[in-house]
Amino acid sequence: MDTRLLEILVCPVCKGPLENRKAAAELVCKGCKLAYPVKDGIPVMLEDEARQLAPEEY
């Protein structure tokens, strides 16, 4: 994923920063405890598509 894109993307819920987890193909918001999927290099920034993080993933 493009580094410049990662710099401007924020969580759509809280507007907080996102952590790129390449191995899991996800962008993670630690504040909301949500992981947004990245499909074919495109982040899906919809709250309905995000999964809730398990406590050990914070």
Image: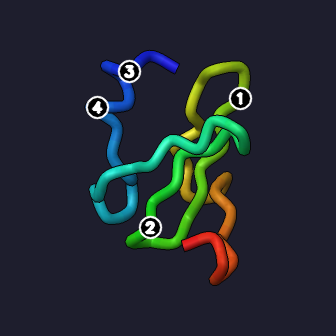
Q: What's the amino acid at mark 3? A: Thr
The residue singled out by tag 4 in the image is 7
Which residue, as the protein is rendered here, is positioned at the far bottom? 55
Residue under circle 1? 39
Q: Could you tell me residue 23's position as x and y percent?
A: 71, 39
Name the mark on residue 3: 3
* Amino acid type, residue under disc 2 in the picture: Lys
Colour setting: rainbow
Pick whichever of labels 1 and 2 is earlier in the sequence. Answer: 2
Q: Do the residues labelled 1 and 4 touch (CB within 8 Å)?
A: no
Nearer the observer: mark 1 or 4; the answer is 4
Q: Of helix, strand and loop, which one carries label 3?
A: helix
Q: Return the disc, 3 or 2, that comes first in the chain's sequence.
A: 3
Determine the residue positioned at 63% across, 36% down. 22
> Which residue sits at x=52%, y=72%?
33
Q: Where is residue 56 in the image (x, y as percent from the top left)?
A: 66, 78
Q: Which label is found at residue 30? A: 2
Instruction: Judge whether 37 appears above or below 50 on screen.
Output: above
Badge 4 amino acid:
Glu
Q: Are marks 4 and 3 in contact (CB under 8 Å)?
A: yes
